[in-house]
Image: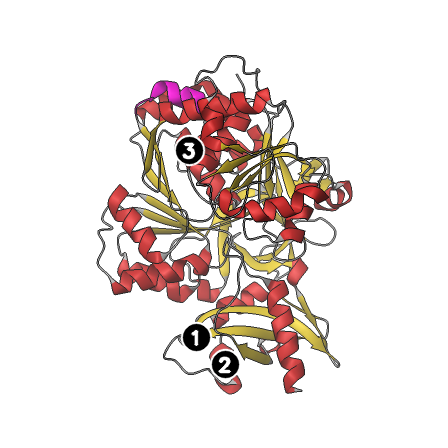
């Protein structure tokens, strides 16, 4: 047996069939029930000619059906593809086409978008709709999800022998440009993104250990709060399921809804994506009384968790451990912020031995030198980007006979080896030859008590090429900080050349559904605002 997700999860099912595996919007499934529903769906896909290597889009919001679909596709060696449910027609056309989708499982509320895209994509042959029929008409030939399950066997008969080489594709959320499909071997992602089945301890040495370990575990109850279209939520879900724990989901994230779920299901661990998800959680904690005594840890990944919010969470949930981690769709997990570190002093992470920071000559930067380099990872890394050999060649490189991935994150290395994350090179601002990383400036700005959220971007400047600008969301009841006040606040936090020279207040900062900054939107808003005041 190899490190294949379906094989290992079936072992867990056989070890703990009656243990609760999933809860979502009132539906509870034991591991046995979860497996039977996935088996039925897998047989349905197979009957439609879907199998080894075929790509099927998961165009859904959170629910048991999302994880059932992924598990079913893994069983027949097909590949689930995460689809951003916020995408409009042209974005969906791009993704459906780029991913070569042969099938789509979609929520009925998105039927109009799916119908609009289908005539422009000739690969999609099969459609399955999840949820109540009403609202928008379903595209011709669509099968209802529960009807598909009811017509098939709940057993595992006829499934192919699987491999650790079977693919897991994660389409990046993309802070700039269109998303790309990161291709992982399941074995590589199991170790790089799922901690080898046990992130807090010893990874599995053999795939046959999955069932016995799950049986021996005291099961954790986890709540991956982001949409499952976000890689962190998918990986977090499978980590806990492979450990024999329960995964709880809510369809639409709100602070109040999250806290009700924590109280009701006795959640032990919560995963969020930075400030965008932390803010409503903190606001709800401050406005109501909830029983959060079961909560042990809150993990944040994928976006900045600013110092004011860390402090507030520590104040409101003093017994909860905060794990601020660093990683990407191309690397999996790289490392976590050291205990006691302050986001206001820079985004610093203690990284694993497979992570390095390279200079322009692909030489590891000297710790303490202040040299800015590219974050790189070796070992269990992806195969590349689906259908994009040129981008693959630029991102995946050989250095002294070792294959590395360089996803574009920039960093320096402290004397003690701690990595100081600066941000993505693709959104780097070049102002008069000085390179400025928006995430670093955002972290400093968010320490201002009047600001709820910020996005920093570069806008055109006749003299400097670009100047630093910031979109600000001001806290309700607070006054908009003046340019002088912002400069004074940042004076001891970042170098003067990094301080925004133009700021613009908005009612709400726009982010992706996963909480990542929308730099394209911010650049457009700031450029237009600066032009109107010139």
Q: Main secondary structure of the magenta part?
A: helix
Residue nearest the observer in this picture, 422 or 515: 515
Q: Secondary structure at mark 3?
A: loop
Please give the name of the residue rendered at 49% of the width and 85% of the height, measured from the top-left corner. 482
Asked if one can make out residue 406 in the rendered structure from this viewpoint, the answer is no
Residue 13: in magenta span: yes
Q: Are marks 1 and 3 in contact (CB under 8 Å)?
A: no
Q: Which residue is mark 2?
A: 486
Q: Secondary structure at mark 1?
A: loop
Q: What colouring style does the render use?
A: secondary structure
Question: Magenta part of the protein: which range?
Answer: 9-18
On screen, 146 above or below 223? above
Q: Which residue is mark 3?
A: 198
Q: Secondary structure at mark 2?
A: helix
Which of the 4 image quarters holds residue 83?
top right
Residue 293: in magenta span: no
View extreme (top): residue: 157
Please give the name of the residue rendered at 69% of the width and 54% of the height, measured from the top-left corner. 359
Q: Quadrant of the C terminus?
A: bottom right
| Residue 405 locus on image (x, y percent) | 66, 43
| Residue 458 locus on image (x, y percent) | 65, 71
C-alpha span from label 2 to label 1: 8 Å
Q: Which residue is mark 1?
A: 448
Asked if one can make out residue 214 in the rendered structure from this viewpoint, the answer is yes
On screen, 354 above or below 325? above
Residue nearest the observer in this picture, 146 or 275: 146
């Amino acid at each position: 047996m190899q490190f294949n997700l379906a094989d290992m999860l079936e072992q867990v099912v056989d070890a703990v069939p009656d243990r609760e595996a999933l809860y979502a919007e009132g539906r509870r499934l034991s591991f046995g029930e979860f497996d039977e529903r996935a088996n039925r769906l897998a047989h349905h896909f197979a009957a439609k000619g879907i199998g080894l290597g075929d790509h099927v889009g998961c165009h859904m919001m959170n629910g048991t059906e999302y994880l059932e679909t992924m598990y079913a596709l893994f069983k027949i060696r097909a590949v689930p593809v995460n689809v951003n449910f916020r995408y409009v027609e042209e974005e969906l056309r791009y993704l459906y086409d780029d991913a070569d989708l042969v099938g789509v499982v979609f929520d009925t509320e998105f039927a109009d978008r799916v119908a609009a895209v289908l005539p422009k994509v000739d690969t999609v042959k099969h459609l399955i709709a999840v949820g109540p029929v009403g609202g928008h008409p379903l595209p011709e030939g669509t099968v209802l999800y529960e009807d598909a399950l009811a017509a098939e066997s709940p057993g595992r008969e006829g499934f192919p022998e699987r491999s650790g080489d079977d693919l897991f594709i994660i389409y990046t959320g993309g802070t700039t440009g269109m998303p790309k499909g990161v291709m992982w071997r399941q074995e590589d992602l199991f170790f790089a993104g799922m901690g080898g089945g046990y992130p807090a301890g010893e990874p599995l040495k053999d795939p046959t250990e999955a069932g016995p370990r799950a049986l021996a575990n005291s099961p954790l109850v986890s709540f991956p709060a982001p949409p499952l279209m976000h890689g962190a939520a998918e990986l977090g879900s499978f980590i806990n399921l492979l450990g024999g724990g329960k995964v709880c989901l809510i369809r639409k994230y709100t602070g109040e809804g999250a806290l009700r779920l924590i109280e009701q299901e006795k959640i032990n661990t919560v995963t969020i994506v930075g400030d965008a998800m932390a803010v409503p959680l903190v606001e709800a904690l401050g406005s109501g009384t909830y029983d959060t005594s079961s909560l042990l840890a809150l993990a944040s990944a994928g976006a900045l968790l600013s110092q004011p919010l860390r402090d507030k969470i520590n104040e409101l949930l003093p017994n909860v451990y905060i794990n601020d981690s660093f990683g990407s769709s191309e690397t999996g997990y790289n490392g976590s912020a050291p205990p006691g570190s302050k986001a206001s002093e820079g985004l610093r992470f203690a990284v694993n031995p497979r992570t390095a920071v390279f200079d322009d000559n692909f030489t590891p930067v000297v710790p303490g030198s202040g040299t800015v380099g590219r974050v790189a990872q070796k070992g269990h890394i992806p195969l590349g980007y689906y259908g994009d050999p040129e981008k693959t060649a630029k991102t995946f490189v050989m250095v002294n006979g070792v294959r590395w991935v360089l996803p574009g994150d920039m960093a320096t290395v402290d004397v003690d080896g701690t990595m100081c994350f600066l941000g993505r090179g693709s959104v780097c601002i070049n102002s008069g030859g000085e390179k400025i990383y928006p995430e670093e400036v955002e972290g400093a700005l968010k320490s201002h008590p009047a600001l709820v959220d910020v996005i920093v971007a570069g806008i055109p400047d006749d003299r400097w090429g670009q100047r630093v600008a910031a979109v600000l969301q001001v806290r309700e009841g607070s006054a908009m900080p003046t340019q002088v006040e912002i400069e004074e606040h940042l004076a001891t936090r970042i170098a003067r050349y990094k301080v925004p020279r133009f700021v613009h207040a908005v009612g709400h900062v726009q982010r992706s559904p996963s909480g990542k900054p929308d730099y394209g939107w911010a650049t457009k808003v700031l450029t237009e605002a600066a032009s109107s005041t010139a």
